[in-house]
Amino acid sequence: MTVAYASIKGLAYYDMRRGYNGFTLITPTEGTKVYLIDMLGNVIHAWEMGYPAATPAELLPNGNILFAGRVEGAPLTGFEGAGGILLEIDWDGKKVCEYQDPYLHHGFFRMKNGNTLVMKWVRTPDDIAAKVKVEGTDPSYWLESMKRGGPMWDDAIQEVTPEGKVVWEWVGHEHFDTEVDLTCPICPKTEWSHATNIGELPDGNIMASFMELNTVAVINKKIGDITWRFGRKILRHQHFVSVLDNGNILVFDNNHHGYVPRQDSRVLEVNPEVANPSVEHMHVRVGAQSNAIAWSYEEAATGLFTACNLCSAQRLPNESNLVAEGEWGRIFEVTVDGELIWEFVNNLPFYEAAPGRPKPCSVHGAFRYGAEYSGLKRLGIVDESAREKKQAAPGKERVKVSEEEQKKTTEEFIAERLRRLGY
Ligand SMILES: [Zn+2]
């Protein structure tokens, strides 16, 4: 069913009364560009990065793009999320700074002090690797790769200055607990934890998502201890996590062969006050919905919402959520009530696609920035001529959507689109 989405390219739906007005930064998986689009799907600005992306890029408050690139020939290039270079590029495409480490992978986070948190793979010492346990006790889950010996890798998190100096480091295997931090029984035993995303909490501590542990963790930055864990037997290879203004945590829970068999992805808002780690580990049963989940978006009934690895989720100032269902190139805004109010399917120009290959549309993720965002201050100057060429710049002429159209529910809208496509 989800294929239908890939058949519609560009702006698919826009409830102008409720969509959070702004510009959306899109990081495709193909090509080496990052695009900024308006609410109608027009490309307003694009940056040439010189590398394919390893993770969603971000537009910083200073108007620069922070971008993790995938370097060919990196030692662990076969691992999902491999990177190797972090670039900060200004609005005009000029490089401001770069940081290289062949073991960099996945996400990054620009800290309040101007430094950047990065993640890298580190070799798990063999004596610790031998003690790593897998979730579940049924050996039939274990693939041949699980029984095989060989190197195991886990994650380090580093704080790097703009000059490229590492000023803080946390090494996973020095703090993971082999009795608690159990790895996935299905994924190859080449990685213990597989970090995908990091962030700095308001109190200065670090939040990280470890996919293979099905765990979102808080790390005490001073002493390195993991002080809070959430997700074991609840999350299913989550990727993207962020801290909300209310102190809760927004997490994109993918569905990649999770402990609880389901077909769909979901976005969860987790209340960390309720999700006490000791309670989590002692009492959560398989399939149980933790009372720590304050809100969720899912499409269990229709199966129309699925992303295995590529995804992002962002809580917007109007309390709606911008979600990227990356494999399908689908980016949508949904209200707290689960109502679709904006939808775009990636149709950006990928002239780099190999001849004969289908035009790819997948994206690493997307973020929306309000029109007043400081990082967009160059918009009005540099791109005025480009914007005038567009049929409808934000705040001026808009797509005509009839009242009747606007009253349609999400279900009616999807049903109509599927009908039009012959499904
Ligand atoms: Zn797995």
Image (cartoon, rainbow, N blue to C red):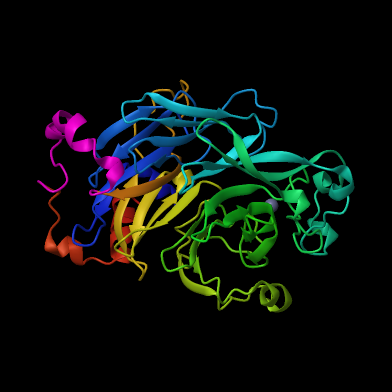
Residue 315: image x %, image y %? 39, 59
Residue 200: image x %, image y %? 52, 54
Residue 347: image x %, image y %? 34, 37
Residue at 85% across / 49% down in the picture?
A: 128
Residue at 70% across / 50% down in the picture?
A: 193
Residue at 62% across / 30% down in the picture?
A: 101
Q: Is residue 65 left or right of residue 205?
A: left
Which quarter of the figure has residue 413? Answer: bottom left
Which quarter of the figure has residue 105? Answer: top right
Query: Can you see residue 421?
Result: no
Residue at 46% across / 42% down in the picture?
A: 114
Residue 117: image x %, image y %? 55, 44
Q: Is residue 338 left or right of residue 296?
A: left
In this view, the residue in front, 273 or 31, is: 273
Query: Can you see residue 54?
Result: yes
What's drawn in magenta, residue-wise?
Answer: 371-396
Q: Is residue 371 left or right of residue 312?
A: left
